[in-house]
Amino acid sequence: MSNLGLLKKVAIFKDLTDEELNTIDGMLVERYYKKGCLILKQGDAADAMFMVKEGNLRITKLTMDGREKIAGFLKESDFFGEICILIGKERCINARAVTDCRLAALSRSDTISILEKMPKVAFSFINTLCSRLVEAEHHMDGLLFKSIEERITDQLYELSKGHGVYLNDGVLVNIKLTHQFLADMIGISRESVTRGIKELKREGVIKYMKNRHYVLDASPFRSI
């Protein structure tokens, strides 16, 4: 995919003119990472934001007790690393290549220049930050008030938004997920995930599993 093709798919740039996109294209630096490589490390200096041209990445955060919690999966046209460069802070996430990856990097100075000169991008950045704050609040509510089954359901449906494939009999979450993976994402024990999944299968929220891929009830997203 060309850089222009990528930029037209990235949410914060998709409404720009071709002239504006060409300006940003001239600022991008392509980077390649092999499967398993660490792309960002929590605590490092934040010097650039990234857009995914090819491949898949896993985003994680270290908890207070030193465990690594999975925060999400990224695919083509997703972007990451933008929050810390805006406020000039060190990295608050880890990013690791799940497959071979090709990324487009935009330096901190160029990002700030774009925000100053292109109001549409600045507005999109604000929307993105607000959306992520809402997601963080939703996650905290889940930790405090929701059952294990509700938290598993929320996580599976959230993954299906970016990685879902609609089938005749449900929605396939097109990522291989072990019980430990889900436990790391939700912040509970693997044993609790196993019990929760058994109950969700009984209730029909999880229709079936095949090769560690979940097929969910295709009803509108819901909390149980």
Image (tube, rainbow, N blue to C red):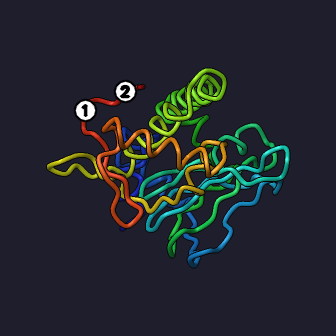
Q: Position of residue 165 (x, y in %)?
A: 27, 52
Camera-side residue of 209 and 177: 209
Q: Position of residue 167 (x, y in %)?
A: 19, 51
What residue lies at 57% left-to-right and 42% top-to-bottom? 114
Camera-side residue of 217 and 193: 193
Picture quarter with the N terminus: bottom left
| Snapshot quadrant of residue 53 | bottom left
| Snapshot quadrant of residue 44 | bottom right
In the rendered image, the vertical position of residue 201 relative to residue 37, given as above or below: above
Give me the disc on residue 50. none
What residue lies at 44% left-to-right and 58% top-to-bottom? 75
In the rendered image, the vertical position of residue 118 relative to residue 62, given as above or below: above
Q: Classify mark 2: residues with Cα within 10 Å, few (<14), some (14-19) or many (20+).
A: few
What residue lies at 23% left-to-right and 46% top-to-bottom? 170
Q: Classify mark 1: residues with Cα within 10 Å, few (<14), some (14-19) or many (20+).
A: few
Looking at this view, name the residue that lies furthest to the left. 168
What residue lies at 42% left-to-right and 48% top-to-bottom? 10
Q: Position of residue 193 (x, y in %)?
A: 55, 46
Q: Which residue is mark 1?
A: 219
Three-letter amino acid code of the residue under disc 1: Ser
In the rendered image, the vertical position of residue 87 relative to residue 93, given as above or below: above
Q: Position of residue 121 (x, y in %)?
A: 50, 36
Picture quarter with the C terminus: top left
Q: Are the residues at dot 2 and dot 1 in contact (C-beta closer than 8 Å)?
A: yes
Q: Which secondary structure lies at badge 2?
A: loop
Three-letter amino acid code of the residue under disc 2: Arg
Q: Which residue is mark 2?
A: 222
Looking at this view, name the residue that lies furthest to the bottom. 34
Camera-side residue of 29 and 90: 90
